[in-house]
Amino acid sequence: MAQLTLEKLNKRYGDAAQVIKAIDLQVNSGEFVVIVGPSGCGKSTLLRMIAGLEDISGGNMYIDGTRVNDDTPSERGIGMVFQSYALYPHMSVYENMAFGLQLAKLPKDEIARRVEASARILQLEPLLQRRPKDLSGGQRQRVAIGRAIAREPKLFLFDEPLSNLDAALRVQMRMEIAALHRRLKSTIIYVTHDQVEAMTLAQRIVVLNRGNVEQVGTPLELYDHPANEFVAQFIGSPKMNLMPATLVHAGQTESVVRLWSGKELVIPIATPTSAEGTKVKLGIRPEHIEWGSVAEAPNLADVLFVEHMGNETYHYLDSGKLGEPWVVRDSRRSDIAAGDTVGYSLPPEHCHLFDESGQAFARRAVANGASRLPGMDAPPITFAEPARTNVMH
Amino acid sequence: MTHNSESLLPSAAVAPPPTASAPGRKRSLQQRRARAAWVLVAPALILLFAVAGWPLLRTVFYSFTDAAMDTPEDYNFVGFANYLDFAEGESFGVLADPLWWQAVGNTLWFTACSVSLELFFGMLLALLMNEKFRGQGLVRAAILVPWAIPTIVTAKMWGWMFHDQYGVINDLLQRVGAIAAPLAWIAEPDLSMWAVVIADVWKTVPFMALMLLAALQMIPSDLYEAARVDGATAWQRFRRITLPLIMPAMIVALIFRVMDALRVFDLIYVLTSNSEATISISGYAREQMVSFQEMGVGSAASVLVFMMVAGIAACFLWINRFSHEGKEARE
């Protein structure tokens, strides 16, 4: 258990562009932090710099207040789980887990105690004499974690540990890792490109993009108050809809925007920094768009296609020349079909506003639990020809 | 053969005999597969027998005769006399010839020295080439040059380099002050074997290096990173990760090189001609057969060379399998 502090950490390869740009981050003792970002954003490089596998080009890194820039991985006292597991193929599970302890010249009985203890935590005891090639993917993953645990590190580093597993196993291992963190109460830094893993595992998420930290916060903070368009679209699946709009009235408590369709909308977000008439973007999550009747709803759109997930339904609405279709997520089954015309509205309390540079205007705090389920109290809906009604459940 | 392979396809297509039960049909399919396999392997087997098996049998046959090189059809059987014979308190035959034992000693010494030096330098080069650096492709290509040069050319080239008066080696050594007077590398019995070993190492290190490089590149880089996280030093990473993982490829490379080295002839013959200090067992067989026209004795020596090489190769394979089984058993 240790505290990690990154201070203006950066990385450049030769004369090429910086891949990590002056990152400041504080990870508290016992905290589970997930670094998430699209591929190529530098998240693995950042983790490898923390591990000591990549040189730090500039800035400082502290573990428990001690500067460790020039320490080797083992001197930093980290344990790392690799994406490919990186188990030594010529050693048994026991030898894999004992290797680092042998190199540290621990006494034999201490090595045995530690290996057996971590094997017990991960239910690896029956596998100790096997070779990695005789193990399944999930078992290999557990051995890789066990090897890290046996070192009793100050800091656990996970580099996309679940991306080689199939979907069902991924969910199971995700829960095991969460349980492991509750049990060991260790400091964990976990890198993934999968925002679902980030949302489910993290106490705090660091969103990384092109070597920059876009936002740091708890999963729900990022979901409810994304700092910019990038975070808004990266966190949440399907991603947030972004619609072009013009600021008609910039107020201290609420603002009026004119949508691309000409309709005006009053949104409870202050936009003191922007002049009236500037271009903004209105963001709304797929589950927040509400259906309305074709006759009364403020907006109409054609349905391009519909995806039925069983527990929920995704509708893709034609956005005309604006590019990507809007996505509407309905937690109910729906009998809307491709080709239908639907009416919908954008509840102002669920809207986000972004300025021209993509930065978000601050929203008011979202009252947890108080938010209305979309469409729950909507009136019976009728659609343009052929007349259809939503199937209510 | 042709008939067989032609009959396979139609019979596979037509309906099986009505009496054949399901398992019976299965067996016959397997039999047909086995027959097809034999048909496909047969040309290679016939060719191998013609170019390797038959000459070997003829050599074994002649080793029991007193045939001469110019009249091989005129011979008498002499039993094991070409190998070892006793008459009037004296022993005769290849095994009683001190020069044969000298050749055996030379060959084993040459093999041990050259193969271990090749392994050492080959490993160094392979590790170097496995690192990323600018001009890597050029180095890999350049390193192959000695391997691509014919042995005769290598031998002649090193012959000139080792020349006692005009050779570049003596010149260099004198310039750096390592020796006071020129050395007779080829003529001096103590030095000539080293000259041969140096030339052979220069020529075959690329082979060893490339075999080892191929094995090194199979090792995923994150194993080394995991080892660094585990606190392994560079030497420990080499000793505990690299070496065990390239061991199978290394043993194969060693078998190749040991068998090649045991059969060495051309390099030694061209570099040092008939010097007894460097004569190899193959050179001994050639001398008996060609210089002395003793086809029987030469064949006997050849058979002994064959048995020695085959025996050492078998030992290698046996040790390899034994160590492998030991590993399996421990699992």
Image (cartoon, rainbow, N blue to C red):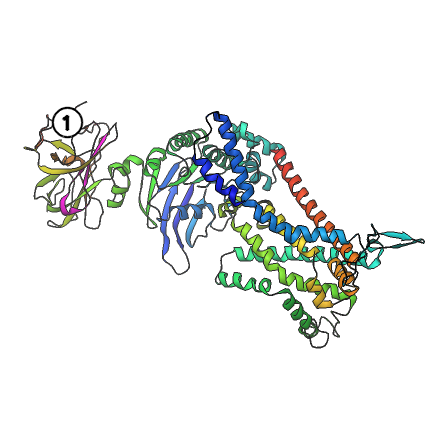
Which chain does the numbered disc 1 sit on? A
Highlighted range, magenta: A309-336
Tell which of B135 and B278 is nearer to you.
B278
Look at label 1 and name its amino acid. Asn
- The part of the image, by quadrant, that contains residue A158 is top left
In the picture, which quadrant includes the N terminus of chain B? Answer: top right
Q: Residues within 10 Å of mark 1 (few under 14, many from 20)?
A: some
Which residue is most to the right?
Answer: B88
Side of A213 relative to A382 (left or right): right
Q: Is residue A40 above or below residue B205?
A: above
Identify residue for label 1: A390
Residue A314 is one of the magenta-drawn residues: yes
Tell which of B176 and B70 is nearer to you.
B70
Side of B1 relative to B182 (left or right): left
Which residue is most to the top?
Answer: A393
Q: Position of residue A219 (x, y in %)?
A: 31, 36
- The part of the image, by quadrant, that contains residue A264 is top left
Q: Is residue B105 above or below residue A128?
A: below
Q: Position of residue A62 (x, y in %)?
A: 44, 46
Q: Is residue A69 above or below residue A297?
A: below
Side of B238 relative to A234 (left or right): right
The residue at the point 89 percent across, 52 percent down is: B86
Side of A326 relative to B68 (left or right): left
Q: Position of residue B46 (x, y in %)?
A: 61, 49
Instruction: Answer yes or no: is residue A202 visible.
Output: yes
Q: Position of residue A131 (x, y in %)?
A: 55, 35
State the SS at label 1: loop
Instruction: Answer yes or no: is residue A66 visible.
Output: no
Residue A306 is one of the magenta-drawn residues: no
Which residue is most to the bottom?
Answer: B166
Tell which of A365 and B277 is nearer to you.
B277
